[in-house]
Amino acid sequence: MKTNLPQQLHGAPRPRLRRARHPRHSFRLRGAAFCLAALHEALEAVQRWPVFESPHDGYGVLLEEVDELWDLVRKWTLNAAKQRRLRRLMAGECRQIAAMALRFALEIGDWPDVSGARRRRRR
Protein backbone atom coordinates (compact mmCIF):
# COMPACT_ATOMS: atom_id res chain seq x y z
CA MET A 1 0.00 0.00 0.00
CA LYS A 2 1.33 3.39 -0.94
CA THR A 3 1.47 5.79 1.99
CA ASN A 4 0.76 9.50 1.87
CA LEU A 5 3.55 10.33 4.31
CA PRO A 6 6.22 12.75 3.06
CA GLN A 7 9.10 11.00 1.35
CA GLN A 8 11.68 13.53 2.57
CA LEU A 9 11.28 12.27 6.15
CA HIS A 10 12.59 8.79 5.29
CA GLY A 11 15.99 8.45 6.90
CA ALA A 12 15.68 11.79 8.69
CA PRO A 13 17.29 11.95 12.14
CA ARG A 14 15.01 11.95 15.16
CA PRO A 15 14.25 15.46 16.45
CA ARG A 16 15.97 16.66 19.60
CA LEU A 17 14.24 18.64 22.32
CA ARG A 18 15.28 22.20 23.23
CA ARG A 19 14.65 24.02 26.43
CA ALA A 20 12.08 26.83 26.31
CA ARG A 21 11.73 29.81 28.60
CA HIS A 22 7.99 29.52 29.21
CA PRO A 23 6.16 26.29 30.20
CA ARG A 24 3.57 26.79 27.45
CA HIS A 25 6.32 27.10 24.84
CA SER A 26 8.08 24.11 26.33
CA PHE A 27 4.90 22.05 25.96
CA ARG A 28 4.53 23.16 22.34
CA LEU A 29 8.14 22.34 21.51
CA ARG A 30 8.01 18.99 23.26
CA GLY A 31 4.65 18.21 21.65
CA ALA A 32 5.97 19.03 18.19
CA ALA A 33 9.10 16.94 18.81
CA PHE A 34 6.94 14.06 20.06
CA CYS A 35 4.74 14.21 16.95
CA LEU A 36 7.77 14.23 14.67
CA ALA A 37 9.30 11.31 16.55
CA ALA A 38 6.01 9.37 16.28
CA LEU A 39 5.86 10.13 12.55
CA HIS A 40 9.45 8.94 12.18
CA GLU A 41 8.56 5.75 14.06
CA ALA A 42 5.50 5.23 11.82
CA LEU A 43 7.63 5.64 8.69
CA GLU A 44 10.08 3.04 9.98
CA ALA A 45 7.20 0.66 10.73
CA VAL A 46 5.77 1.13 7.23
CA GLN A 47 9.15 0.22 5.71
CA ARG A 48 9.77 -2.72 8.04
CA TRP A 49 6.35 -4.40 8.37
CA PRO A 50 3.63 -5.30 5.84
CA VAL A 51 0.32 -3.49 5.54
CA PHE A 52 -2.36 -4.35 8.08
CA GLU A 53 -4.50 -7.11 6.59
CA SER A 54 -7.63 -6.04 8.45
CA PRO A 55 -8.79 -3.70 11.20
CA HIS A 56 -8.35 -6.62 13.62
CA ASP A 57 -4.66 -6.82 12.72
CA GLY A 58 -4.15 -3.10 13.33
CA TYR A 59 -6.07 -3.25 16.59
CA GLY A 60 -3.94 -6.18 17.74
CA VAL A 61 -0.70 -4.30 17.08
CA LEU A 62 -2.02 -1.22 18.87
CA LEU A 63 -3.22 -3.30 21.82
CA GLU A 64 0.18 -4.97 22.09
CA GLU A 65 1.86 -1.56 22.40
CA VAL A 66 -0.64 -0.47 25.07
CA ASP A 67 0.00 -3.71 26.99
CA GLU A 68 3.74 -2.97 26.94
CA LEU A 69 3.03 0.48 28.40
CA TRP A 70 0.79 -1.06 31.06
CA ASP A 71 3.61 -3.44 32.07
CA LEU A 72 5.85 -0.40 32.65
CA VAL A 73 3.15 1.45 34.60
CA ARG A 74 2.77 -1.52 36.94
CA LYS A 75 6.53 -1.44 37.64
CA TRP A 76 6.32 2.14 39.01
CA THR A 77 8.33 2.58 42.18
CA LEU A 78 9.29 5.36 44.59
CA ASN A 79 12.98 4.93 43.84
CA ALA A 80 14.06 8.11 41.98
CA ALA A 81 16.68 6.39 39.81
CA LYS A 82 14.19 3.76 38.68
CA GLN A 83 11.56 6.46 38.08
CA ARG A 84 13.85 8.26 35.61
CA ARG A 85 14.45 5.04 33.70
CA LEU A 86 10.76 4.10 33.73
CA ARG A 87 9.72 7.57 32.55
CA ARG A 88 12.09 7.28 29.61
CA LEU A 89 10.79 3.80 28.75
CA MET A 90 7.15 4.93 29.11
CA ALA A 91 7.76 7.90 26.83
CA GLY A 92 9.19 5.52 24.22
CA GLU A 93 6.13 3.27 24.48
CA CYS A 94 3.83 6.30 24.16
CA ARG A 95 5.71 7.26 21.00
CA GLN A 96 5.21 3.76 19.61
CA ILE A 97 1.51 3.84 20.49
CA ALA A 98 1.12 7.16 18.68
CA ALA A 99 3.03 5.80 15.67
CA MET A 100 0.89 2.67 15.45
CA ALA A 101 -2.32 4.71 15.88
CA LEU A 102 -1.19 6.99 13.04
CA ARG A 103 -0.32 4.05 10.83
CA PHE A 104 -3.61 2.31 11.65
CA ALA A 105 -5.62 5.44 10.84
CA LEU A 106 -3.81 6.04 7.55
CA GLU A 107 -3.91 2.45 6.33
CA ILE A 108 -7.47 1.64 7.33
CA GLY A 109 -9.09 5.04 6.79
CA ASP A 110 -10.19 6.59 3.51
CA TRP A 111 -7.96 9.67 3.49
CA PRO A 112 -7.56 11.95 0.46
CA ASP A 113 -4.30 11.88 -1.47
CA VAL A 114 -2.26 14.97 -0.57
CA SER A 115 0.91 13.97 -2.39
CA GLY A 116 0.95 17.19 -4.39
CA ALA A 117 -0.36 15.75 -7.66
CA ARG A 118 -2.42 18.39 -9.40
CA ARG A 119 -5.90 17.50 -10.54
CA ARG A 120 -7.51 18.97 -13.62
CA ARG A 121 -10.26 21.44 -12.94
CA ARG A 122 -13.52 21.31 -14.84
CA ARG A 123 -14.46 24.52 -16.57
Image: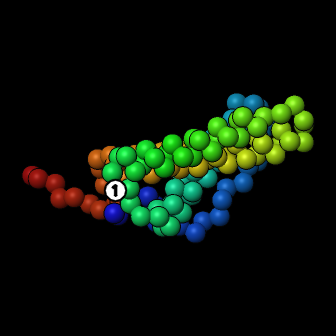
Question: Which residue is farthest left?
Answer: 123
Q: Position of residue 4 (x, y in %)?
A: 38, 58
Q: Is residue 110 left or right of residue 43?
A: left
Q: Which amino acid type is marked by label 1? A: Glu
> Can the viewer see residue 45 in this picture?
yes
Q: Position of residue 68 (x, y in %)?
A: 63, 45
Asked whether 106 or 50 is in front, the reply is 50
Q: Is residue 70 left or right of residue 60?
A: right
Asked whether 86 or 18 is in front, the reply is 86
Residue under the image location 45 percent in, 51 percent down: 103
Q: Is residue 94 left or right of residue 51?
A: right
Q: Position of residue 61 (x, y in %)?
A: 48, 49
Res 50 quadrant in image: bottom left
> Can the viewer see residue 106 in this picture?
no
Q: Position of residue 111 (x, y in %)?
A: 31, 48
Q: Say which element carries label 1.
A: loop
Residue under the image location 75 percent in, 31 percent down: 23
Residue under the image location 66 percent in, 59 percent down: 14
Pointer 1 residue: 53
Image coloring type: rainbow
Residue under the image location 69 percent in, 44 percent down: 91
Tally of marks: 1
Q: Residues within 10 Å of mark 1 (few under 14, many from 20)?
A: few
Asked whether 69 or 18 is in front, the reply is 69
Q: Which image quadrant: the N terminus?
A: bottom left
Asked whether 45 or 117 is in front, the reply is 45
